[in-house]
Image (cartoon, helix red, strand yellow):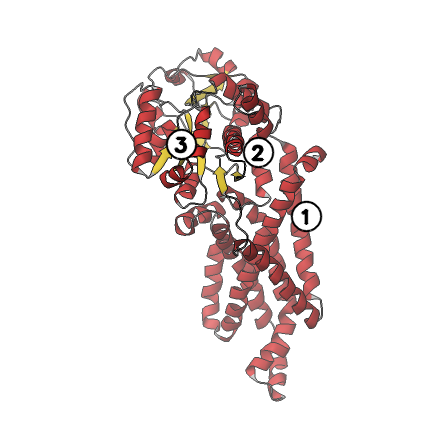
Amino acid sequence: MWQILMTRHDQLLAALWQHVQLTVMAVVIAAAIAIPLAIWAEKNRRYAEWLLQLTGIFQTLPSLAVLGLLIPLVGIGAPAALIALVIYALLPIFQNTYLGLTGVEHDVLDGGRALGLSRHQVLRKIQLPLAQPSIVAGLRTATVLIIGTATLASLIGAGGLGDFILLGIDRNNTALILIGALASALLALIGSFGVQWVANRRPFWRNSLLIGLSALFIGGSVLPMLPGKQAPATITIAGKLGSEPDILIHMYADLITQAQPKTRVVLKPSFGVTSFLYGALENKKIDLYPEFTGTVTASIANPPVQLAAGADAKATYVAAQKVARKNGLVLTKPMQFNDTYGLAVTKKLAQTYDLKTIGDLKKVPQLKAGMTAEFLDRPDGMPGVEKTYGLKIPSVSLDPALRYQALHDGQVSVVDAYTTDAQIQQYDLQVLTDDRHFFPVYQGAALMRADFATAHPTLVAAIDQLAGQISDDDMRAMNYAVNVKHQSAASVARHFLKTHGLLK
């Protein structure tokens, strides 16, 4: 953990700042909505129960579902994450404010009115001060809730401490997970006590602190967007979950920097699944990302391209190029390795039931599959496998990084695998032969918008140096170095480029 803190302290500070920004902005916005709403509901109590039920429903919505629903509306990144966090913060703030206001004794309110105080003065001088402990409790609860939920923001490219947790799960690195989790827990404690501390200050100092903090966070968010000196060209490269996309985006970054030294390259690893990255590319949130020819024809094409059984790499790439052009995109020349899908079992199970092909799974009684959600849903995934091989296997959805551990621990019998996955070597697994040639070819290539490619021909030429490079064994060895030996994706990528004469 200490070594990671020393090597990644800049990344940790950046993630912490992103997390704090999201939390503060979400609490402020939620309070600006919920507190006035609770004041109104206290005077119109027949609507209060409906509002409590509505905010309660918001609280029960699964966070991943909320993020998924917001992406088509506002895109990926901080805006979607901020809206989701505000939704989750409404209930505790509204509920506690309403209960605090309605809990003030009527005799106290009548006494204020008897002294000639107006309705507004009664609220400001009597109700709100007496309800303050309850309101502060709601703000503290919302703050802690938001800090915990904000770790999911990294799934849609909003950053935060979730980047460390997701990276740790993907790399099977407990230290990274602990750093992200402990930092989030510590931040929750600081946030909870911080809200209470600010609330206990005298009005002048409390208001000064709130104005100062607001200026700090608004300034930190807005100032970078103001016009100033012309900044160097910035190119944003994102990658899917996993070590392989992480290695590839670092290769792209090194080659681009070598070809265009003045270009600033921003990397967004572990950005999510195909739909997230493709949406980000369309919305110009990112400029390019590593994609696979088979994924373009099966998941990006609408409707999916029906390739002939056993279509080779060239035919798949030509079909993927056509799909890309139709969608206003450019797919660079593919690399050599074929990271296609496969079904993997332990060698012990394969020996017990003499499993060699996917069709042989019919021999196994009480078979249970653990698959990624994407594989269970894709037409070239489990639905197509079952149809082609006449199988019907009970399946559960598992995180990509956890499915191999579940197989190793005997919790599932078979998992979906990529043929270049390091875990095949790490857990001594056997990939069953796809003798009916169901899975298409999946060669890696960079996907970008056509207008971006036209504006950056030098960049495209730099990435095209990888065309025909990186064999299956090369990719599997690099994945093993990152996932099992815990080497950084950046160092592994740079070592390959240098040893193959692609980087000076």
Q: Secondary structure at mark 2?
A: helix
* 3 or 2: tag closer to the N-terminus: 2
Judge the density around disc 1: few (<14), some (14-19), many (≥20) Cα neighbours within 10 Å. Answer: few
Residue beneath disc 1: 186
Q: Report the number of discs.
A: 3
Picture layout, residue 298 above or below residue 96:
above
- The secondary structure type at the circle numbered 1 is helix
* Distance from the alpha carbon under mark 1 to that under mark 2: 20 Å
Residue tagged 3: 376
Q: Mark 2 packing: few (<14 Cα in 10 Å), some, or many (20+)?
A: some
Q: Which mark is residue 264?
A: none
Note whether 478 is above or below 99 in the view shown. Answer: above
Q: Position of residue 30 (x, y in %)?
A: 53, 61
Q: Is residue 127 left or right of residue 57?
A: right
Q: Residue at x 54, y 65 (%)?
A: 32
Q: Work out whether 309 lies above or below 36.
A: above
Distance from the alpha carbon under mark 3 to that under mark 2 = 21 Å
